[in-house]
Every structure is written in structure tokens, then in C-alpha cells.
Amino acid sequence: MRKIIVTEFITLDGVVEAPGGSETNHPNAGWQYRDPEAGQYKMDELKEVDALLLGKNTYEQFAKYWPTQSGNGFADPINKYPKYVVSTSLQKAEWDTSHILRNIEDVAALKKTEGGNILVYGSATLVRSLFHHGLVDELRLLMYPVAVGGGMRIFDDNRDLNQFELKRAHTFDKGILLLQYQSKK
């Protein structure tokens, strides 16, 4: 069975929204900063999977940018890998190797197919649903030492219990903390 790996840039107060600055109109957008070691980790992380799972908003942002990029450790695999976008409203997925999944049951079925691990970038709304349905096998957080005072979070008040065990912890030179957890299910 394939594993679903969620990877997020996150603040100390749990916000995942607008790390780069242009994704939303968050008043404290742009809190993510570059760190060469963390950047290398993100490239290595992409080598461990062979498909992407994205929510509609993240998919649309990626589809505007990545198809015109090449090389650099990210663009080639992202453009080559199958991309599964979960959406009830998206009518057409035009980015090469993209497929639309209509519901969480389709995601559960995807996990049972042949292939390697599946990486979820961002996609906070989708991630909350994956947690709620027990579909997250691994959680990777790059926690930035900032608090932005509010915004979108992947952990909500639904009171579902998801137990994880620490697989790896590492502090990068610029104070970013990598927390890598594996599901205990």
C-alpha cells in the first residue's frame, strides 16, 4: 500500500497560510525564508515519492507556475509525476499527468494502487480531511520560528485523535525545525 506523506511549512502558532507571500492576502504573508539546508531537504523529499496529491487551490497555484519551469531539482519531477487533485468543482485538469479525484474515497482507493509514496504539498483543507479520515501516514513539518497571529491551519477543532511517533527531528542553521512523524495506526 502506498503511503500519503503530508509536508508543510508551518509557523510556531500553527499557520500554514501564505508562507511565500503571494498565495493569499494574509497580513503577515511572506514569513517563509530561504535556508540552503532546508531547500536541499525539500529536493531530497521529492525524490522519495512518485506522485503528488493536491487540493484544488494548491493545484491551481502550482499549475500556473511549474509547467513553464525546468530543472532545479523541483520542476522536472513535479512536471513529470502524476498529480492527483481532489476537487468536486474542477472541471478539467490541463497540467500534464494530472488527474481529478472527486472525494476522499477516491484518495483512499488511490492509496491501495500500485506505486510509490504520494506527497501532499500545502493543501490545508485537503490535509484536514485526510487527518479526519485517517489517511495520513507521515507528517513532515518545517516549523519556522515566527508567529503570525492567525490564518489557515491544518489542525482544526474536529477533536479527532491522530497519533504519531517522532521519526526525525533536526534544526537547520537558520532556526527552522524539521519535525518528521509517522502515524501510529
Image (cartoon, rainbow, N blue to C red):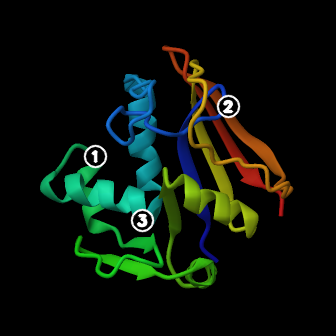
Q: Which mark is residue 169?
A: 2
Q: What percent of the width, then of the height, locates residue 84?
A: 42, 73
In the rendered image, the quadrant that contains the C terminus is: bottom right
Q: Which mark is residue 154?
A: none
Q: Secondary structure at mark 3?
A: helix
Query: Taking 31 as reference, is 127 left or right?
Result: right
Tell me the distance, in whole angstroms, between the alpha carbons under discs 1 and 2. 23 Å
The residue type indicated by label 3 comes to Lys
Task: Read off the residue under disc 1.
Answer: 73
Mark 3 against mark 1, which lies toward the viewer?
A: 3
Q: Position of residue 113 (x, y in %)?
A: 55, 85
The type of residue carrying mark 1 is Gly
Instruction: Please tell me how crowded label 1 is: few (under 14), some (14-19), or many (20+) other residues with Cα within 10 Å.
Output: some
| Residue 52 placement, left or right of 61 | right
Of labels 3 and 2, the one closer to you = 3
Count of numbered marks: 3
Q: Position of residue 51 (x, y in %)?
A: 43, 68
Q: State the residue at coordinates (32%, 37%).
A: 22
First of labels 3, 2 by sequence position? 3
Height in image: 126 above or below 32? below
Amino acid on which the number 2 mark rests in the picture: Ala
Q: CA distance from mark 3 to mark 2?
A: 30 Å
Depicted 51 relative to depicted 122: above or below: below
- What residue did someone put label 3 on? 56
In the image, residue 65 sits, relative to residue 63, either above or below, namely above
Asked if marks 3 and 1 touch (Cβ < 8 Å), the reply is no
User: Which mark sits nearer the N-terminus, 1 or 2?
Assistant: 1
Q: Quadrant of residue 160?
A: bottom right
Instruction: Label 2: state its secondary structure.
Output: strand
Q: Nearer the viewer, residue 30 or 6?
A: 30
